Image (cartoon, rainbow, N blue to C red):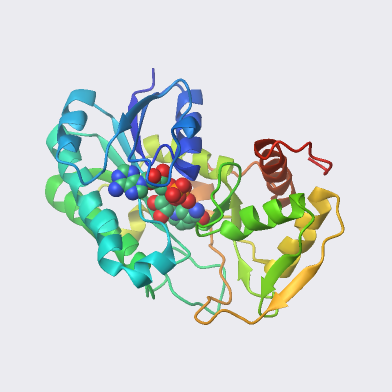
Amino acid sequence: MRGRALVTGGAGFIGSHVCDAYLADGWEVTALDDLSAGKRENVPRGASFAHLDIRSPELCDLLLEGQFDVVNHHAAQVDVRVSVARPREDASINVDGFLNVLEASRQAGVARVVYISSGGVVYGEADDLPVEETREKGPLSPYGVSKLTGEHYLYYYRVVHGMTSVSLRYANVFGPRQDPHGEAGVVAIFARRALRGQQLIVYGDGEQTRDYVYVKDVAQANVLAATLELPGLGSLDDFAFNVGTGRETSVNELARRTAEVSGRELDVKREPARPGELLRSALDVRKLRAAGWSPAFSLEEGLAETYAWVAESEGVESEGAA
Ligand SMILES: NC(=O)c1ccc[n+]([C@@H]2O[C@H](COP(=O)([O-])OP(=O)(O)OC[C@H]3O[C@@H](n4cnc5c(N)ncnc54)[C@H](O)[C@@H]3O)[C@@H](O)[C@H]2O)c1
């Protein structure tokens, strides 16, 4: 056994893949989730499950009893629009809830906390891409503020309490088990619509770009983050790693590739651009690559697996290239 890992948000989209990857790497895994968005069936059979809110006072008992080597924190309010509509709800989960996880980890003497931040929202709009970890921060949503705040708390716990931690700043993650409402929901939406032979809806000119990274590659970054050698002390960014591909993909290209993997002719319907939408985004991932991470999936391979999963979960035999 490599050690004991607690994955918060472990019944969610990315967290459940992280549970899979930790199990495959020889860790004993407990998934924690309040099932507000996650599903019990996402948790792999080899993992234990704790049905708990991260804000709950019982969290400390769980950590004291569990003697975890790594706490991997994926549980969160994940919707930018919800954070804009209800910023206090966002902060309650993403700031207050995370502080509860940190305090419990400190009291239980957890060796390492792996925290999930977001490269798509902490940097704000940038002209020259891809964005390096040291780029000036400028979150433009309550969700971005709460994610960056978590990194500042980690800095405090590191310097003052000697807690070892890593922040992973994800690009737009996609893959099986994704709910269409998350940050990279467009892949899940396109895959479902393609399966039904429906039009793909593109907002604006479709030339807005994102950095789409496949969830199994992201899960491997979490495996690396659990044991990665880290500097003694340093700045916030010294302990942060972008997780993406470094490559921009436009919505138009995504629509084209979705049609390819589905093996169907799909119409594209144009709708007016959505106000406030980031125009371009891509993360520089040289730092994580230098630390030993190398993504195994191309965009095409990831899309093909995602499409096959959507087809299977909807009980349809996939006709596509998957
Ligand atoms: N999907 C992306 O592209 C992306 C990009 C950047 C960062 N992230 C981050 O990755 C993490 C996972 O996101 P995801 O896309 O898998 O979303 P998700 O909604 O599938 O996962 C979040 C999980 O947290 C659980 N949760 C929410 N509030 C909770 C609470 N109070 N207590 C316990 N559990 C709670 C939910 O039930 C869900 O299972 C989040 O921290 C998110 O901010 C995701």
Using the image as rendered, state which of residue 110 and residue 89 is in the foreground: 89
Taking the spot 79% from the left edge, 55% from the top edge, the residue there is 197
User: In this view, which residue lies farthest toward the top?
Assistant: 1
Report the side of 189 relative to 74 (left or right).
right
Residue 210 position in % (x across, y down):
60, 65
Q: Is residue 72 above or below residue 120?
A: above
Q: Quadrant of the C terminus?
A: top right
Report the side of 196 relative to 77 (left or right).
right
Q: Quadrant of the N terminus?
A: top left
Residue 173 position in % (x across, y down):
55, 52
Report the side of 202 relative to 72 (left or right).
right
- Using the rendered view, name the quadrant where residue 204 is placed: bottom right
Q: How many marks on residues?
A: 0
- Using the rendered view, name the quadrant where residue 66 is placed: top left
Residue 27 position in % (x across, y down):
40, 24
Evaluate whether residue 215 shows in this view: yes
Taking the spot 57% from the left edge, 65% from the top edge, the residue there is 282
Q: Is residue 307 above or below residue 271?
A: above
Q: Is residue 30 above or below residue 113?
A: above
Using the image as rendered, state which of residue 127 and residue 287 is in the foreground: 127
Using the image as rendered, state which of residue 286 and residue 93 is in the foreground: 93
Evaluate whether residue 168 shows in this view: no
Residue 71 position in % (x across, y down):
30, 37
Using the image as rendered, state which of residue 229 and residue 312 is in the foreground: 312
